[in-house]
Image (cartoon, rainbow, N blue to C red):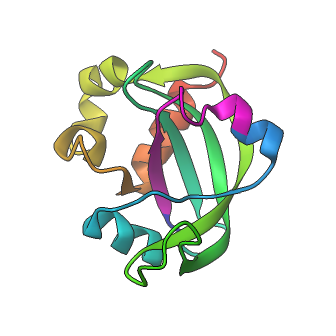
Amino acid sequence: MNYWLVKSEPVKYPWEKFEKDKRTFWDGVRNYQARNNLQAMKVDDRVLFYHSNEGKEIVGIAKVVREAYQDPTTEDPAWVVVDLEPEQKLDKPVTLDQIKKDDRLNQIGLIRQSRLSVMPVKAEEFDIIVGLGSKE
């Protein structure tokens, strides 16, 4: 299993809407590195859902339920989407500030490649973040 992080602006697509929808295709990716990451996702991979711009925090965990296919919002064959389903909301959001201050997470892509919208996360990083977002 692999682990990922996807970013969404909460004004455009917040976690609460994702939970209400119960499933969505992850579209709008127009960066080749992020697209390649979408293409690498496999069914049942786990995904951290990050609110970008406003909030700047990881708020939930999703899973991949359909692997990459043509982005239905464009006719350009270069772009793909994956289908995601929400798995669980974190008990408490994990902020970007928390992540930056945690020495165990100093190599996470969220810090190193802050503008990338879809990125891999190491299993250890995923577990640390889920732990930080759990009730104490």
**Furthest residue to the front?**
75
- When asked about the image quadrant of residue 81, the answer is bottom right
Q: Residue at x 72, y 34 (%)?
A: 17
Residue 110, position as x, y percentages in the image: 29, 41
- The answer to whether residue 69 of the structure is visible from this angle is yes
- Up/down of 77 relative to 27, above or below: below
- Image quarter where the N terminus lies is bottom right
**Furthest residue to the bottom?**
77
Residue 41, position as x, y percentages in the image: 51, 72
Taking depth in this image into account, of 88 and 35 the one nearest to the observer is: 35
Query: In screen coordinates, is 76 left or right of 81?
Result: left
Taking depth in this image into account, of 11 and 16 the one nearest to the observer is: 11
Residue 129, position as x, y percentages in the image: 48, 35
- When asked about the image quadrant of residue 106, the answer is top left
Q: Residue at x 71, y 29 (%)?
A: 16
Which stretch did the figure color magenta? 3-17
Queried whether the magenta region covers residue 14, the answer comes back as yes
Q: Residue at x 41, y 79 (%)?
A: 76
- Tally the numbered discs: 0
